[in-house]
Amino acid sequence: MTIPTIPPAAYLILGAILFAIGAIGVLTRRNAIIVFMSIELMLNSVNLSLIAFSYSLNSMDGVLFVFFVMAVSAAEAAVGLAIFVQLYRTRETINLDEINMMKW
Amino acid sequence: MFEQNISIAVQWLIFLGTACFAILTSILMVTRRNPIHSALLLVLTFLLTAVLFLLLRNPFIAIIQVLVYAGAVMMLIVFVIMLLELKSELRSALRVSFSKGAAVFTVLVILLCLFFAVSREPKGASGEYTSEMVSQLGSIKVVGKLLLTDYLLPFEIISILLLAAIVGAVVLAKQRLVEKE
């Protein structure tokens, strides 16, 4: 009797659960930094799914995609956090409910 | 046969332990009141995901995960939390309201759809890079070769994007000296 190897669906389900937790964080928290960290968690869970696909399909494309996703999220972190610092300097708050100057 | 069973059982143990711990830390990350606790729990989640990348025979992405995500991005976030000096009302925890309940319900419905979509075997043409071949060549060598042949254009675009992001971050975070005078 042999134990079955870990199916790729197990990794995909874990990725889906982490993605849902991140989405709940984005929708329910109002602190901009925590929303930002939840977005990073969502990106990370998508990376996990991409790597699981690339492992199960014997392809290298998923790995390259993860590489590009990481580069984009590093750029996003630099610009996004600079925007938070600038917002805090001018508005003294990073609560997303109070930042509504572009809303009408 | 016995040795193979042992190795697969150990892989299952590592996977289940890491998966449960990652779900736990990410739930804690979303619900903490203090942003710095959230940041440290997110670092823990990233490290656990790096373990899962190792389990998927991908040491290159695991190393990049630890360096870029758990190292660089999270250090930036921790520094910004330190700079901002958040007031006590900004450290609010989850407040229950109707719209937030609706948001959680919507996300859970999406999660259910994802379960149905994901729970069957992924279909698609199998590629040429089996894990034996990649581990024989070295995964960094394979990734580097693909980056400079098939993925050359995205690679160049990413380099321009990173340059633009650096310039943008410096311009945004700079003190406006003229306005102060």
Image (tube, helix red, strand yellow):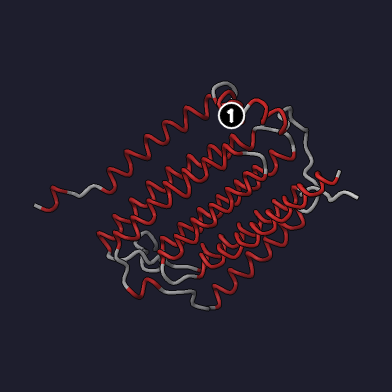
Image vertical order of residue B50 relative to residue A23, above or below:
above
For the point 33% across and 42% down, the residue is B168
**Residue at the image point whose x is 44% and y is 44% from the top:** A74
Query: How many numbered marks, from 0 up?
Result: 1
Which chain is home to disc 1?
B
Image coords of residue B57 (percent x, y): 66, 39
> Residue furthest toward the right?
A1
Of the residues shown, which amino acid type is indicated by label 1? Val
Give the answer, above or below, for where A32 lies relative to A6. Answer: below
Which image quadrant is residue B144 in? top right
Circle 1 is placed at which residue position? B143
* Residue at the image position 41 percent from the left and 62 percent from the top: A32
Query: Regarding mark 1 in the picture, which secondary structure is present there?
Result: helix
- Position of the C terminus of chain A, as image quadrant, is bottom left
Q: In this view, does B119 lie above or below B151?
A: below
Camera-side residue of B115 and B127: B127
Please state the horizontal and vertical placement of residue B104, each as a whole percent of the image: 60, 69
Question: Residue B132: x, y in percent?
Answer: 72, 31
Left or right, B172 with reference to B30: left
Q: Residue furthest top?
A: B149
Classify residue B35 by image quadrant: bottom left
Is A39 left, or right, of B10 in this rendering?
left
In this view of the protein, which residue sits in the foreground, B131 or A41? B131
The single residue placed furthest to the left in the displayed view is B181
Q: What x and y, as percent, mark residue B15? A: 69, 54
Q: In this view, does B135 lie to the left or right of B166?
A: right
Q: How crowded is mark 1: few (under 14 residues within 10 Å), some or many (20 or more)?
A: some
